[in-house]
Image (cartoon, helix red, strand yellow):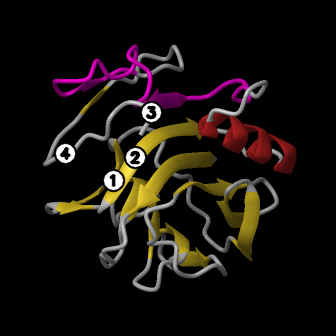
Amino acid sequence: MTVLVYTAMRDTIVVNDSLINQGGVSAAGWRLYTNPVGQIRLLIYDTGNVIVTGATTGLHDNVARVYGARRNAQSTISVWVDGVSDNSATDTTTTTLDSGASPLRLGYYGSGSFGDLNIIAAVAYRRALSDDEMAQATYALQGHAGFILPPFAELYVDFRDSDCYAGSGTAAADLSGNGRDGTITGTTVWMPRGG
């Protein structure tokens, strides 16, 4: 599993800002979020939860970055900031991550808990990207010329692209070709395109 979210976390520190999650607190659920000191964290829920916390603090600074999480076949989970591994840990869970029974959520955790962030784009894979692919995906999400997303994305949304979001309404189209379109809920404040 690999997920990447291109976003700016505002300088208002909100406890446990959720970037992307699936499955809630149930077994097989997971969540990529920040803690109160602005570190990126990946939490996998199981009978014994496992967490990996990034080393970088102060990420609540309204600067757009690509945050990522990866779980690979070698039982390692890691968190990434702008294409560089920020920390890793051994995955002691035995669970198969939620494979679609629960909705995938961007910027929302549940019970009215919305993150204070500007989500620009996000991509999810069922496979673990290589280190080189993590960098490639980061540059592609940031819009650098000559970089494209690695193949076989399960979900890809980019709110700068009018094919994903028309500029009004609540529909967000999946650009991966898999038809996993979403609905925008909650209070939103939209940035100008390109902003």
Q: Residue drawn 68% across and 70% down?
A: 91
Q: Find disc 4 in the rendering and name its residue.
A: 188
Q: In the rendering, which numbered label is found on residue 194?
A: 3
Label 4 with label 1: CB-CB less than 8 Å? no
- Sooner in the amino-acid sequence: mark 4 or mark 1: 1
Q: Nearer the viewer, mark 3 or mark 1?
A: 3
Kindly report the distance in space between the C-alpha atoms of the residues bearing marks 4 and 2: 10 Å
Q: Residue type at mark 4?
A: Thr
- Tell me the element at label 2: strand
Tell me: residue 101, above or below residue 21. Answer: above
Residue at left 38%, top 17%?
A: 162
Tell me which corner region of the image, top left, top right, bottom left or bottom right, holds residue 55.
Answer: bottom right
Q: Which residues are magenta?
A: 148-173
Location of mark 2 (residue): 119
Three-letter code, disc 3: Gly
SS type, badge 4: loop
